[in-house]
Image: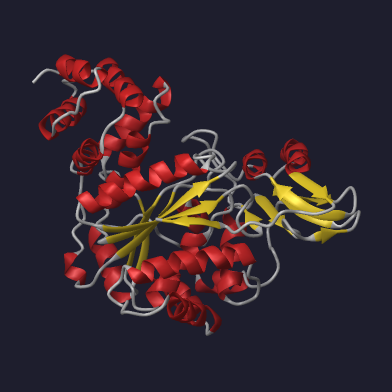
C-alpha cells in the first residue's frame, strides 16, 4: 500500500477501503506518513467527501488508535450525551445526575473549552476538590456506585484525533462533515457508552450556523453510531442566543445548582434539559412502552422532588468535590472579581441576544481560552437579569459582567452593547429545532 496512491484515489472521489484507512492512520502515528502527505489527504477528503462506510471506518480507526473503555461489567445500558458546543451550555451538569437519579447509568468524558465554547471540565474545576483526572478503574467504580461520572478526556483516548485535529486547524480542512463527525464520534465510541444522545447546536453561537449543516452533521454521526453497533439519537437545538442566565465557569455551575435546587429555572434551559433527558431515557433499560408525556413527567418529578439535586451532590462528592461549596451556590454570587452592570438604553422588549458576541465578550472577560495554552479565570463571566422576550425599562440592568480587571470589563462592554437588541416586539422560537 502507498500513501500517494491513496491520496490520488481520494482526489478522484473514489471510496477508500478499510485497509487503506487503517494503513493511513497507523502510518501517521508511526511517522511513516508525513504531515504534508496527511495534509494532502485531508484536503482531498474535504473537497471530495466520504460516504457513510468510509466515515465509519475512519472513526473506528481513530477510536482504535488508543484506549477503548469496556463498560460491559456495568450490566446495564450505559448512556452518554454529547453537545457540539455552545455559549452558556451547562446542560451536562444537570442532565448526568438527573438521569442517574432515575436509574440510568451515565458515563461522560468531557473536554475543556476553547474559543467561545465553554468546557464542562473547566466548569467542574471551579468546585474545590473536584477531581476529573481519574483512572479507568475509578471511572467504572463511580458508574456502579454513584450512577454518574464525568472525567477529563484521557490522554490515550483516540490520539489519532488529536493529531488530525492539529493538522486540520492549520490546513483549512476543519469544515468537513466527515472529519468533524469522525473526530467527535471516535472519542464517544472510545469512552465505552452503549447509547449516545447528540445535542447538535445550530446558530450564531455554534459551529454549524444553519439548519442544513447541523442536520448533515447529525445524520453523519447517527450513521457512524449505528454502523458501530451503538444506539443514537440527535437533537438539533437553537444556539442563536446564550443558553440560560449565566455564561462563565463558576457562574454556570451556580446556575446548574440553582436549577436543580428549584431556585431558578430558565425556561429554555428547562425545555432542553427535559427533551435531552427524554431521549436518553428512551435509549435506556428503564424505558418501556410509554408516551412522551409519561416520560416527561418522570423527568420533571426528578427535578421538582429534589432527587436530581441529591444525586448531583453525590456525584460531586464521589469525585472529591466540596458539597458545602455546592450548597453555598444556592445563594448570591460570591466572587472577588469586579463587576459592571450593563443597563437598557431604552424601554422595550429584548428581541435578540447574539450568542457569538456574548461568547466573545465572555472570552474578553477571561472566562475562555484563545488557544490551548491560555489560562482562564474560573470566576469571570456574565449573568443575565433579562433574556430574550423580557420587557425592560430604560435603566434596567440587563446583565452583570465579572472580570479580574477594569481593562477586561472595558473590552467586553462594547460586545455586550452590540449583542443586545431592544425592540417593540420579538419573534419567539422553540429551542428544540428537530429530533433525528
Whether 123 is drawn above or below 176: the answer is below
Q: Is residue 254 visible?
A: no
User: How many discs appear?
Assistant: 0
Q: Residue at x 15, y 33 (%)?
A: 22
Q: List x then y, in percent, for residue 216.
A: 40, 42
Q: List x then y, in percent, for residue 128.
A: 51, 62
Whether 137 is drawn above or below 177: the answer is below
Q: Is residue 78 visible?
A: yes
Q: List x then y, in percent, for residue 218.
A: 39, 47
Camera-side residue: 175 or 313?
175
Camera-side residue: 393 or 259?
393
| The N terminus, quarter of image | top left
Whether 21 is drawn above or below 403: the answer is above
Residue 109 falls in which quadrant of the image? Answer: bottom left
| Direction from residue 71 to residue 394 in the image, left or right | right
Residue 16 falls in which quadrant of the image? Answer: top left
| The C terminus, quarter of image | bottom left
Q: Which residue, as the protein is rendered here, is positioned at the far bottom?
A: 305
* Image color mode: secondary structure
Q: Residue at x 31, y 78 (%)?
A: 286
Q: List x then y, in percent, for residue 37.
A: 25, 17
Camera-side residue: 156 or 82?
82
Q: Which residue, as the protein is rendered here, is positioned at the far left?
A: 1
| Direction from residue 8 to residue 345 in the image, left or right | right
Amino acid at each position: 500500500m502507498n500513501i500517494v496512491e491513496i491520496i490520488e484515489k481520494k482526489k478522484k472521489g473514489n471510496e477508500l477501503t478499510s485497509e487503506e484507512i487503517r494503513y493511513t492512520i497507523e502510518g501517521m502515528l508511526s511517522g511513516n506518513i508525513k504531515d504534508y502527505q496527511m495534509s494532502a489527504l485531508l484536503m482531498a477528503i474535504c473537497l471530495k467527501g466520504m460516504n457513510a462506510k468510509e466515515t465509519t471506518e475512519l472513526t473506528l480507526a481513530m477510536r482504535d488508535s488508543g484506549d477503548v473503555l469496556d463498560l460491559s461489567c456495568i450490566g446495564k445500558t450505559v448512556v452518554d450525551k454529547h453537545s457540539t458546543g455552545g455559549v452558556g451550555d451547562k446542560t451536562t451538569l444537570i442532565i448526568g445526575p438527573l438521569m442517574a437519579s432515575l436509574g440510568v447509568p451515565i458515563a461522560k468524558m468531557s473536554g475543556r473549552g476553547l474559543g467561545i465554547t465553554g468546557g464542562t471540565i473547566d466548569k467542574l474545576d471551579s468546585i474545590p476538590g473536584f477531581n476529573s483526572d481519574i483512572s479507568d478503574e475509578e471511572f467504572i467504580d463511580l458508574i456502579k456506585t454513584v450512577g454518574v461520572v464525568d472525567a477529563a478526556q484521557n490522554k490515550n483516548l483516540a490520539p489519532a484525533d488529536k493529531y488530525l485535529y492539529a493538522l486540520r486547524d492549520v490546513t483549512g480542512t476543519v469544515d468537513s462533515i466527515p472529519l468533524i463527525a469522525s473526530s467527535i464520534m471516535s472519542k464517544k465510541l472510545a469512552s465505552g457508552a452503549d447509547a449516545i444522545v447528540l445535542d447538535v447546536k445550530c446558530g450564531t453561537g455554534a459551529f454549524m450556523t444553519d439548519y442544513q449543516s447541523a442536520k448533515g452533521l447529525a445524520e453523519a454521526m447517527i450513521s457512524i453510531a449505528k454502523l458501530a453497533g451503538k444506539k443514537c439519537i440527535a437533537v438539533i437545538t437553537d444556539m442563536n442566543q446564550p443558553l440560560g442566565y449565566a455564561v462563565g465557569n463558576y457562574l454556570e455551575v451556580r446556575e446548574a445548582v440553582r436549577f436543580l435546587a428549584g431556585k431558578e429555572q430558565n425556561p429554555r434551559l428547562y425545555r432542553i434539559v427535559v427533551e435531552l433527558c427524554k431521549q436518553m431515557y428512551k435509549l435506556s433499560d428503564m424505558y418501556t412502552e410509554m408516551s412522551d408525556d409519561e416520560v416527561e413527567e418522570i423527568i420533571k418529578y426528578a427535578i421538582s422532588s429534589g432527587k436530581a439535586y441529591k444525586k448531583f451532590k453525590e456525584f460531586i462528592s464521589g469525585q472529591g468535590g466540596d458539597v458545602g461549596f455546592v450548597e453555598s451556590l444556592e445563594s448570591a454570587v460570591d466572587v472577588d472579581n469586579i463587576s459592571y452592570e450593563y443597563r437598557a438604553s431604552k424601554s422595550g422588549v429584548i428581541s435578540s441576544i447574539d450568542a457569538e458576541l456574548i461568547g466573545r465578550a465572555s472570552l474578553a472577560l477571561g472566562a475562555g481560552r484563545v488557544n490551548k495554552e491560555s489560562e482562564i479565570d474560573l470566576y469571570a463571566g456574565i449573568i443575565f437579569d433579562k433574556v430574550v422576550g423580557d420587557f425592560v425599562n430604560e435603566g434596567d440592568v440587563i446583565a452583570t459582567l465579572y472580570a479580574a480587571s477594569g481593562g477586561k470589563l472595558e473590552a467586553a462592554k462594547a460586545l455586550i452593547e452590540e449583542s443586545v437588541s431592544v425592540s417593540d416586539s420579538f419573534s419567539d422560537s422553540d429551542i428544540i429545532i428537530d429530533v433525528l
